[in-house]
Structure formats: C-alpha cells, structure tokens
Image (cartoon, helix red, strand yellow):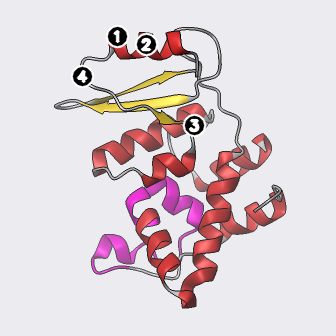
C-alpha cells in the first residue's frame, strides 16, 4: 500500500476470517472480522497471516491482513517518552514472574540510556512499528500485554468493543 486509502482500510477491517481451527476456541474465529482477531487473538491473527502468505490460493487474505496492519500503523501514537515529553519511538516489554512492564522512550541517546538504567534486566528495544512488534515471537501473556499497550498508545478503550473500536480507529485516521 503506497498511499493510505481509508476506504480500503475500512474494507480490510470488515474482512471476515475464512478459517477456524482444530479446537473450539479457534473454530469460533471463523467468520470474525480481522480487526476483531487482531485485538482478541493476536497469535491466531499472526498465524493466519503467515499461513496465507505461503499459499497463493490465500494471497488475498494475506493482502487484507497487510492492509489492516498498514492502516493501524497510520494511527497517531499518544504515548510519551519516560524521560522527556517527546513521542515514544521505542518499546521494550520485560516479562517478570507474574507481570510484564512496558518501557518506552524516544530516539534520543540520553533517553535510551535512561531507559536502560531503570530496567531491572536486559532490555531489547524495538522500533515502535506494528510490523516489528507483531513479528516478535512471544508467549500469550506477552501478546496480551502488547495488545494492552497498543490500545493505550492509540488512545483506545481498554475493554474491547468491535463497533466502538471500528468507529474510534476510523475517526483517528
């Protein structure tokens, strides 16, 4: 998608998942909107996108997922750097025994150093790009934290509601 097309993005948001899965939870995904799967079952969304990419028969589904991700990437980020008031550019989520913590900073070297100094263990900073974050291999707890963080970053309500999310996302673009 070279230039952003809001109408095309809206169509991708409303695209229905053609697949289910081998258990009841995954079977329930069949017929759900892609935007719903992104926020409610990120691991399935990622699996579906990667599987569709490998099969020319399902190339259309991969393209719809890609358009959805590209459109979400256009959303303005509302999270500020922990050290200054600039918009956060980097993210690291560190998983502890029971909880995870999201650390964010801008691209200034001093802010990155500050972030590294407050972290209790080694941190890996990722550019705050949706494509980068989705690609990360992670367990389900990490993915839940990532989705919660993205909701906060985009200024979306914590509790997922498909009609409200669609309306809010489209109004921000």
Is label 2 in a helix, a strand or a loop?
Answer: helix
Q: Quadrant of residue 24?
A: bottom left
| Residue found at x 59% / y 67% | 65
| Residue found at x 60% / y 55% | 162
Is label 4 in a helix, a strand or a loop?
Answer: loop
166 horizontally vs 118: left or right: right
Furthest-left residue in this view: 97
Magenta run includes residue 89: no
Mark 3 or mark 4, whichever is nearer to me? 4
Mark 2 or mark 4, whichever is nearer to me? 2
Q: What are the residue bounds of the magenta stretch?
A: 21-45
How far separated are the C-alphas under marks 2 and 4? 14 Å
| Residue found at x 71% / y 35% | 76
The disc, 1 or 3, on the residue closer to the chain's N-terminal end is 1
How far separated are the C-alphas under marks 3 and 2? 31 Å
Q: What residue did someone put label 3 on?
A: 157
Q: What residue did someone put label 4 on?
A: 121
| Residue found at x 43% / y 31% | 125
Main SS class of the magenta portion in the image: helix
Q: Is residue 171 above or below residue 99?
A: below
**Number of residues whose C-alpha sits closer than 10 Å to that of mark 1, classed few (under 14), some (14–19) or many (20 or more):** few
Is label 1 in a helix, a strand or a loop?
Answer: helix
How far separated are the C-alphas under marks 3 and 4? 30 Å
Q: What residue did someone put label 2 on?
A: 113
How far separated are the C-alphas under marks 1 and 3? 31 Å
95 horizontally vs 75: left or right: left
Q: Is residue 136 above or below residue 127?
A: below
């Amino acid at each position: 998608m070279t230039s952003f097309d809001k109408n095309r993005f809206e169509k991708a948001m409303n695209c229905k998942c053609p697949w289910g899965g081998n258990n009841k939870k995954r079977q329930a995904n069949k017929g759900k909107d892609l935007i719903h799967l992104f926020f409610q079952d990120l691991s399935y969304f990622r699996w579906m996108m990667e599987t569709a990419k490998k099969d020319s028969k399902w190339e259309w589904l991969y393209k719809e997922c890609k358009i959805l991700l590209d459109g979400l990437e256009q959303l303005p980020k509302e999270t500020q750097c922990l050290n200054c008031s600039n918009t956060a550019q980097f993210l690291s989520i560190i998983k502890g025994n029971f909880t995870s913590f999201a650390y964010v900073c801008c691209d200034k070297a001093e802010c990155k150093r500050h972030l590294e100094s407050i972290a209790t263990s080694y941190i890996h900073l990722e550019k705050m790009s949706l494509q980068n974050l989705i690609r990360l291999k992670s367990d389900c707890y990490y993915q839940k934290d990532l989705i919660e963080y993205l909701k906060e970053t985009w200024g979306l309500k914590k509790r997922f509601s498909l009609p409200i999310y669609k309306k809010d996302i489209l109004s921000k673009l």
